[in-house]
Amino acid sequence: MPPRLHVCARCLRASRRSLQVPFNTRNYASVQAIAPAPSIGQMITSTPPLVRYPSTQPPSYRPPEFRKSQLLRQYASLLRSTPLMLIFQHNNLKATEWMGIRREFAIALRKVDSTNRAATGSYEEDLADGIKVQIIKAGIFEAALRVVEYYQPDTHQDFWTPQASDPATPTSTELSNHTPSPNDPTLTHDLSRAAHDAVLSKRFKHPLTPLLSGPLAIVSFPTVSTEHLKAALSILAPKAPTFPAPSRRLNPGYHDLAVQTGIQKLLLLGARIEGQVFDTDGTRWVGSIEGGMTGLRGQLVAMLQGFGAGLTNTLESTGKSLYITMDSRRTVMEEEGKEEKTGSE
């Protein structure tokens, strides 16, 4: 066994003393903090509970992570923001055919913008970039249409919503609107349970529902413009003489084989204009209005003026006929009076 190492006790104390870190201690005077008095508003109201979900993503009855739910929200927003919408049925169009149709469609719309810009001198009526052609899912689009048309949150929400800051709210009230529950009746967005229950009985009752079957495509307009509508129909659904197709000399690209094959596979079904449903003839009638909205207002004014003139003539005819009858009767009585005087003499 090896001998033990003997360490000097004095050296050990010196090493320990060198390892100690000196520190200075300071004493501060302690001051007692005084809390400010609560305000009157804090005394009569209570702090509302924390919302347990972000305001931009409330709980949904339809699972928001599914693509169908996001399509329903997209279609509902499109229906609310689009006053003019054309509905087409497409039959197995190829990608090259869609590409050619969209190219010629954009060219025709830009020509309308350039014509309006030259006539008015302003860029406010440039709508070519806002007019879109897109393919839709018929079933989801029909559900979004029912939500937009038949669901009004202000009229369907006939219950009182308790608020934590309301003094009339009892302390035992359960505030369900602050819990992430999809069945919460206070949630009124498009994917909520309230919206689903409100439009569930309206299936197949909208006038546009019979057209929403099969492969569909829509053309959305940001505003009602008859000039752009006429240009769109001339490209997608040409029909002479009102909506003639572009000639080969003016637009040779429109007569490409891919474009012509795609146009033959498109079928105009109808339109939704300012919330009203129009069939094919009604859509073409709106597109044939000369002068756009100005021309339509002129036709309406002329019709009202003609109606007013006809009503005025109708009301005046009775008085005129009565005046003529009384005047003729007065003439007859005067002649009879003259004959009696002559006979008495």
Image (cartoon, helix red, strand yellow):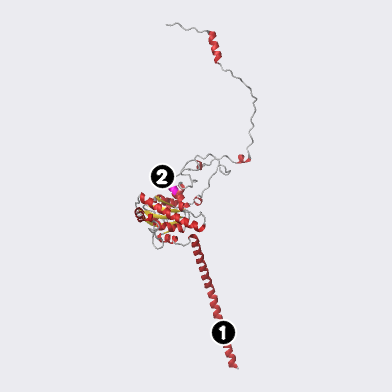
Read off the residue under disc 2. Answer: 67
**Is 31 rendered above or below residue 225?**
above
Which residue is the extreme one toward the front? 249
Nearest the viewer among 53 and 273 is 273
| Mark 1 touches mark 2? (CB < 8 Å) | no
From mark 1 to mark 2, how far is it between C-alphas?
89 Å
Magenta includes 75?
no
Query: Where does residue 53 sit, x and y in percent of width and height?
Result: 49, 40
- Rendered residue at 47%/57% (across/down): 115
Comes first in the chain, label 1 or label 2: 2
Query: Where does residue 145 sit, x and y in percent of width and height?
Result: 44, 52
Tell me where the magenta segment starts and ends, as one range.
Answer: 66-74
Report crowding for label 1: few under 14, some 14 to 19, many 20 or more residues within 10 A (C-alpha): few
Count of picture labels: 2
In the drawing, what numbered circle is on residue 184? none
213 displayed left or right of 330: left
**Is 54 rendered above or below residue 237?**
above
Nearest the viewer among 159 and 128 is 128
Query: Where does residue 117 sit, x and y in percent of width and height?
Result: 49, 56
User: Helix, strand, or loop for circle 1?
Assistant: helix
Read off the residue under disc 1. Answer: 331
**Is 63 rendered above or below residue 115?**
above
User: Helix, strand, or loop for circle 2?
Assistant: helix
- Is residue 316 something that shows in the picture? yes
The disc labelled 2 sits on which kind of residue? Arg
**Is 245 rendered above or below residue 72?**
below
Query: Where does residue 182 sit, x and y in percent of width and height?
Result: 46, 43
Disc 1 vs disc 2: which is toward the camera?
2
